[in-house]
Structure formats: structure tokens, C-alpha cells
Image: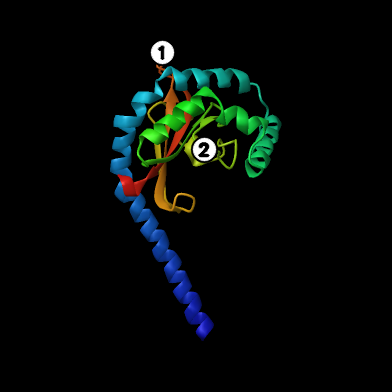
Amino acid sequence: MIRSVLRTASTTLIVLGALTTAALANDFAPQISKEVAEKIRPWLSDPAVVDAVKAQNAKTGGLSDADIDKLDKQWRAEAKGGGGPLVNEVTGNALSSFLKGKKEASGGLYSEIFVMDAKGLNVGTSDVTSDYMQGDEGKWQKTYPVGPDAVFIDDVEFDESSKAFQSQVSTTVVDPATGKPIGAITIGINVEKL
């Protein structure tokens, strides 16, 4: 009897938690969309972003799925180990410096920023991500392949590292010369700062 009551209470808490999270995502979507339109999109056409994505697309365009899996495994091992050639190459490039500057200038609103190429691979990051290949996740699948105006706002979740509630917003990176998608960007938004 006690186990049954505990199970029911536990299930109720899980359902309530899920409903609260979904409500939070919906509550902040208009403010997040405004942030993307007014503050983020304008700097996505900066040559620091566009040139880096185009250069990486030229470099990674011919990679096979096996090549990408190998790179992703390498990244994951290096990320857990505190760095290595692949992680250091990405986090030390000019685009990553640009993104770190945008994060710092946000006054804590942006908890992380990373840009992906046409395959969903990291081009630049403000912080080390857990994986290199984002192409199997909604942040890439619901932006780059969808088109130039795509925006994907994920649920609000509590982020242990920043000790804050955040939502990841992703949008397509477009070549301003052609209007065509070339990659995507994800920004962690601290909703408590909106």
C-alpha cells in the first residue's frame, strides 16, 4: 500500500514537473523570439560567422558518416579529458573568440553559444560542448534543413552548470550574399534574465 502511494505521488510529481517545464517554454517563447529577431540575427551576417561556416563547409562537405562518427568520438573523449587537438582547434579559432565576446557582452543572458556547419558539426563555441556532431539533434534538424527563417525554441530546463533556468534557441545561419542556409546557431538563453 505504501509503495503504491509513493509510486502515485512520484508519478504525479513527474507529470507536474513536465507540465511546468512545458508552460515555461511557452511563457518565454515570445521574449526569446524577440531576442533572436532584434539582437541575434543582426550579427549572424557578420563575416566572422559567415566566413567561418563557409570555410568549414568546404572542409567537411565530403566527410562520410563514419568520418563524422570518428570525429565525434574524438571530441567527446577530448571534452571529458579537458581538451585536445580537435577541441582546441575549434575553441581557439576566431569564430569562438567572437562568440565568447557575444556571450560576455550579454550580461549573463547567453549561457552558451555554438555555431554548426551544413553537417551539424561545431564550427565555433563559446564553451566546450559535450559532443561535436549536433546534426542528430533538434537544434540542427529543425533549423538548417528547414530553411533560412527557421527558429527552434527548446523547452526551459534547469542547467546545473549555470544554476539557472535556460532555453536553447536555434536558428539558421544564412549566407547574406545568396540568402541560402549554410549552417545553424544555438544560444542558451537564461530565462531569468529576460
Circles 1 and 2 in contact, beta carbons < 8 Å: no
Please give the name of the residue rendered at 38% of the width and 54% of the height, measured from the top-left corner: 22
In this view of the protein, which residue sits in the foreground, 133 or 144? 133
Residue 41 shows in this picture: yes
Amino acid identity at mark 1 = Ala
Q: What element carries label 1?
A: loop
Q: In which quarter of the image is the C terminus?
A: top left
Q: Is mark 2 on a helix, strand or loop?
A: loop
The percent coordinates of residue 122 (x first, y second) are: 56, 31
Please give the name of the residue rendered at 48% of the width and 53% of the height, measured from the top-left corner: 160
Marks 1 and 2, how far apart at CA: 29 Å
Task: Please give the label number shown on residue 127.
Answer: 2
The percent coordinates of residue 187 (x first, y second) are: 43, 37
In this view of the protein, which residue sits in the foreground, 33 or 178? 33
The percent coordinates of residue 186 (x first, y second) are: 45, 36
Please give the name of the residue rendered at 61% of the width and 27% of the height, measured from the top-left corner: 89
Please give the name of the residue rendered at 40% of the width and 31% of the height, measured from the top-left corner: 102
Amino acid identity at mark 2 = Asp
Task: Please give the label number shown on residue 177.
Answer: 1
- How dense is the environment of label 1, judged by Cα within 10 Å: few (below 14), some, or many (20 and up)? few
Determine whether, in the image, residue 83 is placed left or right of residue 176.
right
In this rendering, is residue 29 above or below 115? below
